[in-house]
Every structure is written in structure tokens, then in C-alpha cells.
Amino acid sequence: MKKISLIVLLLLTVTIVNAQSSKVNSAYASYTHATNDLQSGDIEAAIISLGEAAEYIEPTITNEKTMVKSKTWRYRGNIYSMIAGIESMRADYPDATEKAIESYSKAMELDTKGSYKDEITQSIVVMYNSSLNEGIDAYTAQDYEKAIGYFQTNIELYEIIGMVDTMGIYNMAISADLGGNADVAIENFTKCAEMGYEAEYSYNKLIVLLNDQEKYDEALAVSKQAREQFPQSQGIIIAQLNVYLNADKYEEAERDLEQAANKNPDDANMWFALGVVKENLKKSEEAAAAYKKSLEIDPDFYNSNMNLAILYFTKASDLINVANEIPVNEIEKYDAAKADAMEVLKKAIPYFEKSNELKPGNKNVLLDLKEAYGQLNDTENYNRIKKILDNL
């Protein structure tokens, strides 16, 4: 009786194992049907076949005999990869992408001899390309959260084959930044900077994002690393400058930028940044000198031209206000003070004109220029600028 029971048990075990193996084969057959259906354009038939394939394959990943076979997981990966690529199936299979990634990873792990490495890799590449296209489409449609999901999929797929998807990490950072997900953007721009992938831009964005979050110490630490690698990057210098200004660290900024400017005396960006800091420290003469140094190096540097024009214009306005406070009976004193103001105002003119030449049509520049010519009683130039403004 015991012999009969043992035989029955063995037969039952063999039957169960065969049944599970049969399900693996059935899953593959249904997947093959789905592939053929898609190639022939019959999407409805493909959906039915893929549903059957998923139903067949799921029990096999918990059976002790089939769950240890690379083939089981390879087939499962292919099935769910295809499901993930069909939009109308995503509602019924919301975790298809995760299951595909999990399956390919497990398939690679169980393929200890590497017999199917190329086949698994090829399947991963197919899924990667599909996910990349979906990510680009989502990005183009400005659905940045959706784009992040696809680029994350690509990153995970590359990890399975022992590679780093630098482009995926960068795309994810860009999408997160545009989508307002600062934490994800910071995490991935950090990775890009560390890997040297689009490092200058990544450092720049990192500094800006950290500055926006008022993480000034972190932002300055990153900016110093960035400056070591890209000492003449205008974007990084300006980003660092903004951190200093927002953090009210003017003295530290002055010290740092003076050292940097002396190390890189031919860097117009550095002298401009130093000029901005000097202005904030109320050192107007030193600020003017720094701006002029910047313009000696690059006469077409718009920001230095504009800042120098405004510096002189503002100083002249302050002197005019002082002159206007002089009692009316002190005519000589008033005339002398007014003359001093006009001399300073004259200094602003060439820098305003250059700014207008570099970026024509800026209304604020033209309004300041018109006012300056009016104060100087330069009717010809006043009318010239007025005509430009009237035609804007």
C-alpha cells in the first residue's frame, strides 16, 4: 500500500512539474502568437495572446522547478516588456514594466554559464529603445513626470547588463528640473557632474537648484568643485555669484573672486562678478574699476557695459538729489554740484550706447539714455533716442 502511495505521489509530482513546464512552453507559444499578430497589425489578437501568455507564465515563477530556470524569467521578461509597450494594456497591467525589469534581472542572474546572455541583452535593448522613445515623446509633450518614469526604466535596464545609462540619468535630471521636481533633479545632476557627463551644465544647474532651496553652503561647496574644473565658465561664475549674494556673503565673495581674478586676469566674467560684489559692498569706485577691467578684455561684454552705465547713472542721480537740497540762494554751490553730477552722467552715456548697440530695442536702456541726454541738454541725441522709443 505504501509502495502504491509513493508511486502515486511520484507520478503526481512529475505531473505537476510537467504541467508547470508545459505552462512555460504555452506562455512562449502565446507570446510568439502575439509577436506575429503585432507584425501583421492585428493589435486586438496580440492583446488576447499576451493576456494568455501572462496567465500561463505567472504560476511558473513560484514553482520550485521552473522558478530556477533562466528560460522562465526570460520569457516572462519578454511578455511583460511587450505588454508595457501597448498603451491599451497598461491599465490592466500597471506593473508590467517593473515585472519585465525584475524578470530580465533574474534571467541574467540564473544564466550562470552565460548561454543566453546575448539573447537577454538583445531583449533588454529592444525594451530600452521602446522606453526611450516613449520618454522622448512624454518629454516633448511636457509630461515630465511620465518622462521621468521612462528614463528611470532605461537606467534600471542598463544596470541589469552592468552598464550606466548616463544619457538616461541626464534626461531624467532635465525632465525633473522642468517638471519642478527639484530633489530628483539635484540627485541626477549630481550623478552627471560626478561622471563627467554634460558636467559643466550639470554643475551649473546644481548650483542654481541648491541656491533656490536656500542650501547656500551646499551650493558654494558644489560651485567651488565646479570652478576647479571649469574656471572660465560664465554660467558657473554667475551661479556662484548669485549664491554669495543671496546668502549675504559679500566679504567672502569679494575675497574669493579677487583671488580668482588675479589667478585668471584675462577672464572678463571674473572681473564682472567682482564688480557686482564690490557694488553690493558700496565700493563704487572699485566696482567701476572691475567692470572696466572686464571691458578691457571683452569690450562687447553686455553685462559689464550695462552695470557700469547704471552705476554712473545712479551716482549722477544721487549727486543731482544732493544738489537739489542746496538752498536757492547758494547759486554757485548749486551750479558746482550740478556740474559734478553732469560730469558723472556723461560717463554713463558710452556704456548705455554700447549696451543698446549690443542688444538693440531694450526699452529700459533707451529710457535711461533719453533721460541722460535730457539732463545734459543734448537735444539732438535726446530726439534720436525718443524716435527709437516711439517706434518700438
Image (spheres, rainbow, N blue to C red):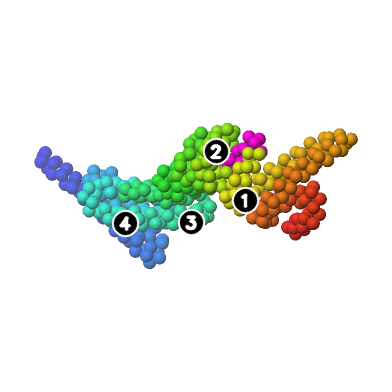
x and y percentages locating residue 179 in the rendered image = 53, 47
Q: Tell me if residue 390 can be seen.
A: no
Q: Which residue is mark 2?
A: 258
Q: Which residue is mark 1?
A: 302
Which amino acid is tagged 1? Tyr
Cα–Cα span, label 4 and label 2: 55 Å
Cα–Cα span, label 4 and label 1: 52 Å
Among the two numbered marks 4 and 1 on one chain, the one whose residue lies closer to the N terminus? 4
Cα–Cα span, label 2 and label 1: 21 Å
Q: Which residue is mark 3?
A: 137
Q: Up-down: is 327 above or below 271?
A: above
Instruction: Tell me the residue at 77%/55% (across/down).
Output: 381
Report the span colored magenta. 273-284
Among the two numbered marks 2 and 1 on one chain, the one whose residue lies closer to the N terminus? 2
Q: Which mark is residue 122?
A: 4
Front position among marks 2 and 1: 2
Instruction: Tell me the residue at 59%/47% (across/down).
Output: 294
How crowded pointer 3 is (Cα within 10 Å; few <14, some 14-19, many 20+) is rated as some
